[in-house]
Image: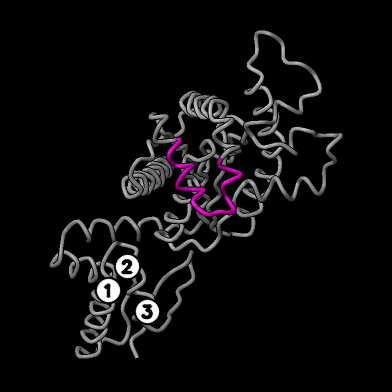
Amino acid sequence: MVLVEGKIGDKVYREPFSKGILSKSLIRSEIDPAKSYEIAVEIEKYYVDNNIEVVKIEDLVEHVADRLNEEDSKLAKKYYKWKEIRRSEDPLIILIGGASGIGTSSISFELANKLGIKNMLSTDMIREVMRKIVSKELCPTLFESSYTAAESLSTPAPPEFDKTLLGFKDHVNTVSVGLTGVIERAIKEGISIVIEGVHIVPGFIDEELLKRNNVHMFVLSLSDEEIHKSRFYSRCRQLWARRPLKRYLKHFNDIRKTHDYIIGEAKNHDVCVIENIDVNATIDTMIETIIEKQTNTKNKEALQTV
């Protein structure tokens, strides 16, 4: 039996070499499933034929990368990127914000799958839980959609303020309390998670949390309004979703106002904004940004110890 040796902190562990686990990591590097398993079988056979009983995980990664280079150097680079992120000993907390219909749920699913993160959560779910705890009389905007929250404002908006955005900010501010609690709990319990939703707005989440090297925030945008509008049609193809489609289109101008506000706040707080046209391009940008932040943090820590 071939054993893979790794290290967590000062503790060394060994576990059996798994073709299934290795092939899954290769699939996340965009390698064909059949080819992934073929490479995993080939690598295991190499260790068995050469009587290698224990292989260090870093040597295994190098072996896999060398093999991928034979197929395509781009695949090897993607595999390295994925492994670089997975090397972190801290849980990975990824926050993906954006206006309704911008694609946060689709991107969060793809990114979680790519990084092997099993936990996903929508801020709409957090809002639903909070609705069971907070009364409508106490917080009326919580019981509206983010883009219609202004309709429940008890005090009329002053002329100098945009009513839609005033309601939106009140709505987001309330849900952010629950969102912050989820982030803090995930960090405490060591749980990697991808959280997405319209309530993830820069400036409403504790800055100290976002400074952590394992917490990453992204904001998705769509500059073209027609592309944004078309996303609602594809989102509401099913018969049961036709009623929500009418609601989205009725309030599309309000949704665009929230879109522009979120993008503006992201730029003000130096949060990565990604034009979400192509899924693969969006995912690649996220992964590269995560690696860059982790690398910069490690370099700073290294300089401090010198």
- The CA distance from mark 2 to mark 1 is 6 Å
Tag shown at residue 83 = none
Considering depth in this image, is 65 or 156 the residue closer to the camera? 156
Tag shown at residue 36 = 1
Residues at badges 2 and 1 in contact (C-beta under 8 Å)? yes
Please give the name of the residue rendered at 52% of the width and 45% of the height, measured from the top-left corner. 95
Q: Residue 77: x and y, percent?
A: 24, 56
Look at label 2 and name its amino acid.
Ile
- The CA distance from mark 2 to mark 3 is 10 Å
Q: Main secondary structure of the magenta part?
A: helix
Is the residue 217 above or below the residue 72 in the image? above
Is the residue 184 above or below the residue 269 in the image? below
- Res. 273 image quadrant: top left
Could you tell me which quadrant the N terminus lies in?
Answer: bottom left
Q: Is residue 299 visible?
A: no
Look at label 1 and name its amino acid.
Ser
- The CA distance from mark 1 to mark 3 is 9 Å
Please give the name of the residue rendered at 49% of the width and 24% of the height, measured from the top-left corner. 264
Decide whether residue 284 is among the magenta residues: no
Q: Secondary structure at mark 1?
A: helix
Decide whether residue 237 is among the magenta residues: yes
Tell which residue pokes out farthest to the top in this image: 159
Considering depth in this image, is 134 or 56 the residue closer to the camera? 134
Tell which residue pokes out farthest to the left in this image: 70
Please give the name of the residue rendered at 76% of the width and 46% of the height, measured from the top-left corner. 130
Pointer 3: what residue? Answer: 20
Q: Residue 217: x and y, percent?
A: 49, 41
Bounds of the magenta segment: 229-245
